Each structure stands twice: as C-alpha cells, then as structure tokens.
C-alpha cells in the first residue's frame, strides 16, 4: 500500500513538471507557424510569461520581441502589457534603472490605451523602485499619480454602477410590462389563478424594490464620495461649474494675494530620513497648512515637491491680504514649535521661507484629463521671487501686499531688495502686533 501511494505521488510530480514544458513547446510551435504580427506578438508575450520563472534570459528575449511587434502594429494595450512584463523581468534580474525605464514606458503606453489597471500597476512599481533608489521627489510624484489613478478607478466604478442601475430600471420596466400582460390573460381565465398570480407578483415586486433600494443607497454613497473628491481638488464654485457645464471658464482677478511656502535645505534633510518618514513628515506639515488655509477661507492651489502655494481673492471676494499674512505667521509659528520638538528628539526638522504678493492673476482649469485648478500671471512669479529673497523662518511681504495691511501687523522695512529676473522691490518682514498693538 505504501509503495502504491509513493508511485502515485511520483507520477503526479512528473505530470506537474511536464505540463509547463509541454505548454512552452506548444507555444513555440504556434509561433513558428504564425504569419501575422499581432498573433506573433501575443505568442511572444505568452512565452515570456511562461519563461519568467525558469529562464529570465529567454523571457527577456520574448518580451522584447512582443514589445517591438506591439509598437509595430500600434496596439497600445498590448504594448503596455508586454512592456510591463519586460519591466518585471528587469526587476527580477536586479536591474533597477532598466526596470524604472521600462515601467515608465509601460505607464505611458497604458495611459495612451486607457488601460488604467496596467497604468496603476506600473505606477505602484515605479513608486517602490524610486523610493529604494533614494529619488524621493520622483517617488512623491509617482505617489500622486497613483492617487490620481485610484480616483479615476473610483469614477469608472461609479459610472459602471450607474449603467447597472439604468439596466435594472429597464429590466424592471420590461418585467412590469410582461407581468401586466400575464395578469390580463389570467384575469380572463380564472379569478383564482389571478389571485395566486397577484400574490406572487407582489412578493416579487417587494423583493425587487428592496434590492433596488439597496443599490440606490450604494450608488448615492458613491456619488457623495465622488463629489467630495472633486471638492478636494477644486473650489466649490469651480466644482459646481465643472459639474453643470463640463468645463470651467478662465477668469481674471485684479486683487489676488498669492503665498509661496518653500522648505529650506529639503534635499539635505531628505537624505537623513527614510522615504516613509520623509513622506510622513511632509504630510504632517502640509496637513497642518491645509487646516490653517481652510480655517481662514483661503484657497490652496497645489503643492509642487516641497513647495506649498495658496491664494485668496479668487471666488469669495476676499481681496484683503490680512488673512493671508495671518496664515503665513501661523505656519511659521507651527514650524518653530515643530523645530523645538524635533530638536529635543534629536531628529531633523523643516524650516521654511514664505513670500506674499498682491496683484492680478488668471485662474482656471486646464485640460480634460488629470485636470487641476491653477493660477497664472506675473503676480505668481513675483510671489515666488519674494519667497526666494526671504530668510528661513520669516515671512517676506511685498509693498503691494503690505500697504493695505500696514495697521494690522508690525513691519520691518528691508529697503529695495534685488530678485531674480526682476527689478529691485520694496520688501517687508512681518510679525504680529505686540500685546498693546
């Protein structure tokens, strides 16, 4: 009996080991007989995936052929899948730079083919590899791209649910029509049959309505989440305009206050922290900035790497720069307190320069994919130059923004200060009024 079980186990192992080899042999024979590039590309990709475990060199050769053929026949979806497999091979062969290049190519092809799941897979690998390579800015950029793809997945899921809902409504209407015909036929035949049918019909309707109510509740919850995601990206008025008209007209605002916040020696500090710690510290600071901006009814525009940009006077008529200056002082106060805590813990800390300028800007939404609310104009460039001319831990204000708020704060006149690509400008360091102010 023991010999019989041993023989069965050995036979099972032999069959299991033989199946992949038989599969590869069948694919190679099919490849030799294939006459069209699309069939050849598909077979090369299947062979690359089959060789992925046992022979990376052969897998790499087949994947490279699959990519070349997909490009030749202009099949972006197949190109993305083949390039992703090719990148996995480079990753397994411990070739991080080659893997990053191929994952980037796979992401571009997947984006062109609207293959969002393939794009998301490539972006997740790029985020992980760039973090391991110490390229934290690229890792942060890929993490933002991943968030965008996840949001897109949520919107696609919502659209699918809406289509399913419409299908259910149509099926329910057709079902009601069929049931009405049956009811009329049964009524002509017998009262008893009609009564029995009506009983089962009502029970079916109650069950269908219960299921429909549950589906409607789920769809409404997804809709609310999508609206909240949109409000996190755009101001309420802009989000409403985009929802109603599917576009947003650019507008000019004559008196907008723009603030630039930039961390000092960010690259040096990034080298002292693990990638997770760096992203966590940035998120902690930016989340606190978001809280200050939201509390004072200002408008966060965007973050670019370690820079934080916001503005006022865009949609609510808040043209006075006093709130923006107050927000800047609160941000510096928060960073000073954080510096004290981090120094006591023996950990690196962030210091920031802040620049504020008042002037005209144009605001709007550009593009139809991965759209973002942004502002343009010389005022934005000037605010950036004012930030660059600031000392760490201070708030530097142009004369245009200082004049309307001169009674609300204490000022230190710096004289005319030279800035990059700009004429000399009158600048002021600002601080809160004292207890008697």
Image (spheres, rainbow, N blue to C red):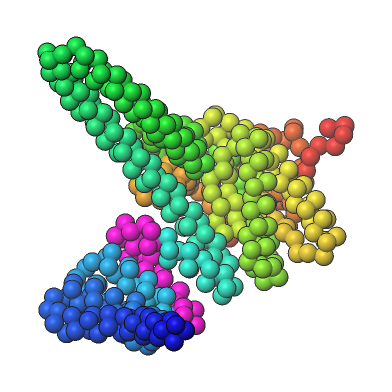
For the question of whether residue 231 can be seen, the reply is: no
Q: Quadrant of the C terminus?
A: top right
Between 186 and 318, the one lying in front of the other is: 186
Residue shown at 32% from the left, 72% from the top: 82
- In the displayed structure, 71 sits above or below 381; it is below
Question: Is residue 405 in the magenta section?
Answer: no
Residue beneath the point at 13% across and 82% down: 33
Bounds of the magenta segment: 91-119
Left/right of residue 243 with respect to residue 298 in the rendered view? left
Report the side of 434 relative to 225 (left or right): right
Estimate the x, y position of residue 366 in percent, counting from the top left: 39, 47
Q: Is residue 373 above or below residue 114?
A: above
Confirm whether residue 182 shows in the render: yes
Residue found at the far right of this picture: 436
* Res 22 quadrant in image: bottom left
- Image quarter of the N terminus: bottom left
Q: Say left or right for 292 vs 420.
A: right
| Count of numbered circles on the image | 0
Above or below — where is 203 with respect to 93?
Answer: above
Q: Percent from the top left, x then y, of residue 270? A: 66, 67
**Residue in the picture at 34% in, 28% down:** 208
Residue 403 lies, in percent from the top left, at 67, 37
Residue at x 24%, y 20% (from the top left corner)? 197
95 in magenta? yes
Please say if 240 is above or below 311.
Answer: above
Front in this rendered view, residue 161 or 66: 161
Residue 250 at what x, y percent from top left? 40, 39
Dominant secondary structure of the residues highlighted in magenta in the image:
helix
């Amino acid at each position: 009996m023991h010999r019989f079980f041993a023989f069965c186990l050995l036979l099972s192992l032999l069959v299991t080991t033989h199946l992949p080899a038989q599969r590869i042999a069948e694919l190679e024979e099919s490849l030799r007989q294939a006459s069209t590039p699309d069939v050849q590309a598909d077979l090369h990709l299947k062979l690359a995936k089959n060789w992925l475990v046992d022979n990376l060199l052969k897998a790499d050769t087949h994947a490279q052929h699959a990519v070349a053929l997909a490009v030749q026949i202009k099949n972006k979806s197949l190109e993305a899948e083949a390039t992703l497999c090719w990148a996995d091979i480079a990753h397994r062969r411990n070739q991080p730079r080659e893997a990053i290049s191929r994952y980037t190519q796979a992401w571009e092809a997947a984006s062109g083919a609207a293959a969002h799941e393939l794009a998301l897979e490539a972006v997740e690998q790029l985020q992980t590899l760039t973090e391991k390579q110490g390229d934290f800015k690229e890792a942060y950029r890929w993490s933002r791209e991943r968030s965008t793809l996840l949001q897109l997945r949520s919107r696609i899921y919502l659209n699918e649910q809406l289509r399913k809902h419409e299908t259910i409504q149509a099926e329910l209407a057709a079902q009601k029509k069929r049931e009405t015909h049956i009811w009329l036929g049964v009524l002509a035949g017998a009262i008893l049959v009609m009564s029995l049918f009506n009983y089962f019909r009502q029970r079916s309707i109650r069950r269908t309505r219960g299921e429909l109510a549950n589906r409607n509740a789920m769809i409404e919850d997804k809709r609310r989440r999508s609206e909240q995601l949109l409000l996190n990206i755009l101001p309420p008025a802009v989000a409403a305009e985009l929802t109603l008209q599917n576009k947003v007209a650019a507008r000019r605002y004559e008196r907008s206050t723009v603030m630039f916040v930039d961390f000092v020696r960010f690259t040096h500090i990034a080298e002292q922290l693990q990638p997770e710690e760096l992203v966590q510290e940035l998120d902690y600071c930016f989340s606190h900035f978001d809280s200050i901006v939201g509390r004072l009814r200002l408008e966060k525009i965007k973050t670019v790497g370690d820079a934080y940009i916001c503005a006022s006077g865009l949609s609510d008529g808040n043209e006075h720069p006093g709130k923006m200056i107050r927000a800047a002082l609160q941000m510096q106060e928060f960073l000073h307190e954080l510096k004290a805590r981090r120094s006591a813990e023996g950990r690196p800390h962030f210091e920031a320069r802040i620049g504020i300028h008042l002037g005209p800007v144009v605001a709007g939404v550009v593009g139809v994919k991965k759209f973002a609310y942004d502002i343009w104009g010389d005022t934005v460039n000037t605010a950036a130059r004012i930030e660059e001319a600031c000392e760490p831990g201070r708030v530097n204000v142009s004369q245009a923004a200082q004049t309307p708020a001169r009674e609300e704060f204490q000022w230190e006149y710096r004289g005319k200060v030279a800035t990059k690509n700009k004429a000399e400008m009158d600048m002021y360091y600002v601080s809160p009024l004292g207890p008697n102010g």
